[in-house]
């Protein structure tokens, strides 16, 4: 039975309790456990919105006999439990429970529009369950009154959940895009969703990186846009993403770039590059790609403490690059031979790559470094 006032927040607990019991009788469901759970719920939260204000842990602790009541209240527009809760519940009984609810007509309209756009029935139902149903429940509005900010709010909740639980939200991201497309088709949203041809925001590209590390990487990439062409910055984002994901997996407790340690973070990352998989095939990445990833990380880590380098690409090779290796005070020993040897291999690959691209000043810089590395290696070997 539909409840009369969809926007009422000061709900009468006894009236809602009676309505729920009537619903159970009319559908032939429920048992003593359901009735007892409902009585306990309304005894503790006469106004269901007081339950919605509880911490997520409390809301998720609702048992199997209480959850049908919560579903009933949400579908009848008497409870907005928050996206954090809605994203943790699959609502497997959603379509069975929709009869005589305020959102049934809206979801039927959504499915019809999705079919017009060529979506298969199974895909349409999945999308409708994941996004539109949750939007209608949480906003308390009809579909015609949904706004772009509503989708943005749900996307933000998905990102927060991913950060909190480590679970990917890729399926929700796809469903949000398809929902946007259908709502635009229905002339509810004013603009089409961004297509795959447009660049993703850096924060989205680095979504699998821990928040504090991601924030530092995004800030660096935003500033690189001032001195580098978009394609260069995009390549940097891809390479730094691998570094950020490695740090997130290797040290989940890492809370700041300032806490990076050479032995615990940098050298393990360099070692992992040897077996880093190539996303385009079953092989590992090339030596040249390993070098580019190392240079991307080196550039990020060597950024100025109080700012960022404003040197433009047209200015050619930087005379301060690898300044430590060329300094007369720089010395090494036998314990650093593996690192020096690896650096020499990488630099040789970079020199060849620069020569092939016609970047003569870059190639000369790399060759000069190779000469210096040979000297350092020789000195380290002789003690």
Image (cartoon, rainbow, N blue to C red):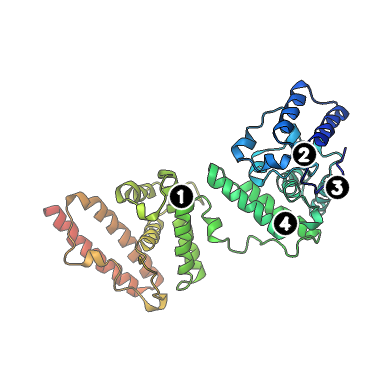
Q: Which residue is mark 1?
A: 245
Residue at 27% x, 67% y: name it.
367
Indicate the quadrant where residue 379 lies.
Answer: bottom left
Q: Badge 3: few (under 14), some or many (20 or more) residues near its Cα, within 10 Å? A: some
Q: Nearer the viewer, residue 369 or 130?
A: 130
Horizontal arrangement in the rendering, residue 60 relative to residue 247 (left or right)? right
Q: CA distance from mark 1 to mark 2?
A: 40 Å
Residue at 48% x, 61% y: name it.
218
Picture coordinates of residue 245, whole percent (x, y): 46, 49
Q: CA distance from mark 3 to mark 2?
A: 17 Å
Contact between marks 2 and 4 (CB within 8 A): the answer is: no
Q: What label sits on residue 180 in the rendered view?
A: 4
Horizontal arrangement in the rendering, residue 191 relative to residue 358 (left or right)? right
User: On the rendered image, what quadrant is the N terminus found in?
Assistant: top right
Horizontal arrangement in the rendering, residue 231 relative to residue 178 (left or right)? left
Picture coordinates of residue 336, whole percent (x, y): 22, 52
């Amino acid at each position: 039975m539909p409840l009369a006032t969809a926007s009422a927040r000061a709900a009468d607990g006894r009236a809602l309790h009676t309505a729920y019991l009537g619903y159970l009788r009319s559908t032939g469901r429920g048992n003593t456990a359901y009735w007892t759970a409902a009585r306990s719920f309304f005894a503790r939260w006469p106004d269901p919105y007081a339950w919605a204000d509880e911490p997520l842990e409390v809301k998720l602790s609702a048992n199997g006999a209480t959850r049908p009541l919560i579903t009933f209240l949400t579908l009848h527009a008497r409870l907005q439990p928050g996206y954090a809760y809605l994203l943790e519940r699959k609502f497997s009984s959603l379509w069975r429970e929709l009869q005589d609810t305020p959102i049934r007509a809206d979801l039927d309209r959504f499915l019809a529009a999705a079919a017009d756009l060529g979506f298969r029935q199974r895909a349409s139902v999945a999308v409708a369950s994941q996004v539109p149903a949750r939007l209608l429940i949480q906003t308390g509005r009809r579909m015609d009154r949904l706004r772009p900010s509503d989708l943005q709010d749900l996307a933000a909740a998905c990102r927060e959940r991913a950060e909190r639980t480590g679970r990917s939200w890729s399926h929700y991201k796809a469903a949000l895009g398809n929902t946007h497309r259908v709502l635009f088709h229905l002339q509810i949203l004013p603009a089409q969703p961004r297509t795959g041809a447009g660049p993703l925001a850096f924060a989205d590209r680095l979504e699998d990186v821990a928040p504090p590390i991601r924030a530092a990487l995004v800030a660096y990439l935003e500033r690189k846009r001032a001195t580098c062409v978009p394609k260069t910055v995009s390549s940097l984002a891809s390479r730094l993403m691998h570094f950020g994901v490695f740090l997130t997996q290797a040290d989940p407790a890492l809370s700041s770039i300032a806490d990076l340690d050479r032995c615990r973070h940098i050298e393990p990352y360099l070692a992992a590059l040897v077996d880093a998989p190539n996303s385009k095939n079953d092989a590992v990445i090339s030596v040249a790609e390993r070098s580019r990833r190392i240079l991307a990380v080196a550039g990020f880590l060597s950024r100025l403490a109080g700012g960022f380098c404003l040197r433009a690409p047209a200015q050619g090779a930087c005379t301060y690059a690898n300044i430590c290796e060329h300094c007369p005070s720089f010395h090494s020993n036998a314990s650093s031979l593996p690192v020096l040897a690896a650096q020499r291999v990488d630099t040789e690959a970079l020199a060849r790559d620069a020569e092939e691209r016609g970047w003569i000043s870059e190639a000369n810089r790399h060759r000069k470094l190779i000469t210096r590395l040979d000297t350092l290696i020789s000195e380290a070997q002789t003690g």
